[in-house]
Image: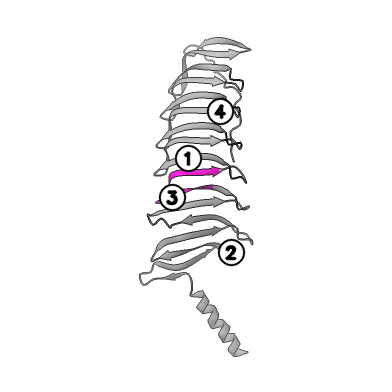
Amino acid sequence: MKYIFFFLLNTFFLFAQDFNKLDENGKKHGLWKGIYEESKRPRYEGTFEHGKEVGVFKFFDDTKAGTIIATRDFSANDNSCYTTFYNQKNNKVSEGKVVDKQFEGEWKYYHLNSPVIMTLEYYSKGKLNGVRKVYYNSGKIAEETTYKNGIKEGSYKSYAENDVVMEESNYKNGELDGQAIYRDATNKITGQGLFKNGKKVGIWKVLEKGKVKEVNMNYENKNFKRPNMPKQPTE
């Protein structure tokens, strides 16, 4: 019985040495497995090559099931990793490339428990750049916003699910600036005028009680109410 015990003990130590090892320079090398401090459940596993992540890393939730909630693929060998997040039903939540711990290029976000894309974003060094697009669950476009270095800059459009453009406006340095047009879901213009540094200026045409009224925003302390916009997708 004593010999069996020592055999099992030696087997355990041999197995334990198969992962979480360091190379001669003290850098992680080979298979590594991390755990959650309190529960001691698996948190991640992946392979290092002399301190550098290689291949695919898997990350697990802190439950008995140990569901994979994220993967990071370092196969490109260009200091980037392709990251995919999942919910606990194994459906994709989002995916895209990370470079130096910052989002880079195209990122996709999905509707809840669905393969349908909800949002497309484009990043440069961790900041939004280009047109950010939001889609209804039907796949139709819901919103288009232009960004530059993480700030709204340029054209903005929002759409009803029947394809009516409900808002056309423009941003400058993160604030509404320039011509803006608002419509209801029947394509009727409900407001039209100019923004300057985020504020309405000049003569605005406003639809009130079925009639178009001109309002001088320079003199009247009257705010134009946007039409009831369709609810944009949030998950």
Secondary structure beneath label 3: strand
Q: Amino acid at mark 2?
A: Arg
x, y percentage for residue 50?
A: 38, 66
Magenta residues, start to end? 94-109
Question: Is 79 part of what is drawn in magenta?
Answer: no
Tell which circle, 4 or 2, labels the residue nearer the N-terminal end: 2
Mark 2 vs mark 1: in front: 1
Q: Quadrant of the N terminus?
A: bottom right
Q: Taking 31 as reference, is 194 above or below it?
A: above
Residue that label 1 marks: 121
Tell which circle, 2 or 3, labels the residue nearer the N-terminal end: 2
Residue that label 3 marks: 98
Tell me the distance, in whole angstroms, between the alpha carbons under discs 4 and 1: 18 Å
Q: Residue 130: name its quadrant.
A: top left
Using a 10 Å C-alpha cutoff, classify the residue at mark 4 as few (fewer than 14 neighbours), some (14 to 19) or many (20 or more).
many
x, y percentage for residue 147?
A: 43, 34
x, y percentage for residue 149?
A: 39, 37
Secondary structure beneath label 4: strand
Using a 10 Å C-alpha cutoff, classify the residue at mark 1 as few (fewer than 14 neighbours), some (14 to 19) or many (20 or more).
many
Marks 1 & 3, CB-CB < 8 Å contact:
no
Residue occupying image coordinates x 45% and y 43%: 106
Determine whether, in the image, residue 204 is placed left or right of residue 162: left
Residue occupying image coordinates x 53% and y 43%: 109
Q: Amino acid at mark 1?
A: Glu
Residue situated in front as seen by the camera: 46 or 208: 46
Residue that label 4 marks: 159
Q: Residue 79: name its quadrant.
A: bottom left
Residue that label 2 marks: 41
Residue situated in front as seen by the camera: 213 or 133: 133
Marks 4 & 1, CB-CB < 8 Å contact:
no
